[in-house]
Image (cartoon, rainbow, N blue to C red):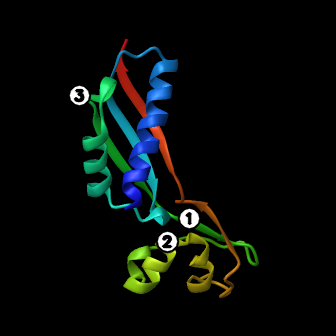
């Protein structure tokens, strides 16, 4: 359900950028979604298509995933984590409260749960194209 809230925030931010750039029409919006967000791209795309109006009427939305890179604070090891390896209950727990990832994920080298999320969290606008 948070895909709808994300869609609203994306459209609001994209509209502000389009206004700053003096675009009369937005033709394409590229969105980058961190893997940790566990956003369902088809649901986000549908929400965007249902909520778009004004300058977005003919806009296409590209949704790209950013892989998660984690770095151990104890030994310094950086690794990409594949969230598809998690069971459904664990994945859902991380989905709703990403901070609980530290409970389930450990450094592959030293086993510490003390790591930082280097990338793969958040949602951001990567590019907006349009006509002036």
- The residue that appears at 43% across and 74% down in the rendered structure is 83
Q: Earlier in the sequence, mark 3 or mark 2?
A: 3
Quarter of the figure that contains the C terminus: top left
Image marks 3 and 2: residues in contact by CB distance under 8 Å: no
Name the residue furthest top. 132
SS at mark 1 in the image: strand
The 10 Å Cα crowd at callout 2, few under 14, some 14 to 19, many 20 or more, is few
Q: Nearer the viewer, residue 8 or 36?
A: 8
Residue position marked by numbered label 2 in the rendering: 96
For the point 46% across and 84% down, which residue is it?
A: 90
Residues at marks 1 and 2 touching, judged by CB atoms closer than 8 Å: no
Q: Which mark is residue 58?
A: 3
Q: CA distance from mark 1 to mark 2?
A: 19 Å
Residue at mark 3 to residue at mark 1: CA–CA distance: 35 Å
Observer-nearest of 78 and 82: 82
Residue 23 position by quadrant: top left
Where disc 2 sits, the SS reads helix
Question: Which label lies toward us, 3 or 1?
Answer: 3
Residue 124: x %, y % from top left:
50, 45
- Residue at image mark 1: 69
Q: Is residue 11 left or right of residue 101?
A: left
Instruction: Answer with mark 1 or mark 2, whichever residue precedes in sequence.
Output: 1
């Amino acid at each position: 359900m948070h895909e709808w809230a994300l869609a609203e925030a994306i459209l609001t931010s994209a509209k502000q950028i389009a206004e700053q750039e003096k675009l009369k029409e937005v033709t394409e919006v590229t969105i980058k979604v961190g893997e940790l967000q566990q956003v369902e791209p088809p649901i986000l795309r549908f929400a965007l298509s249902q909520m778009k109006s004004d300058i977005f009427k003919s806009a296409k939305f590209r949704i790209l995933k950013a892989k998660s890179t984690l770095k151990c604070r104890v030994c310094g090891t950086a690794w990409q984590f594949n969230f598809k390896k998690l069971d459904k209950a664990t994945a859902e727990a991380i989905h709703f409260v990403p901070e609980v990832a530290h409970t389930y994920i450990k450094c592959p080298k030293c086993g510490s749960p003390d790591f930082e999320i280097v990338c793969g969290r958040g949602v951001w606008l990567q590019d907006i194209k349009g006509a002036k």
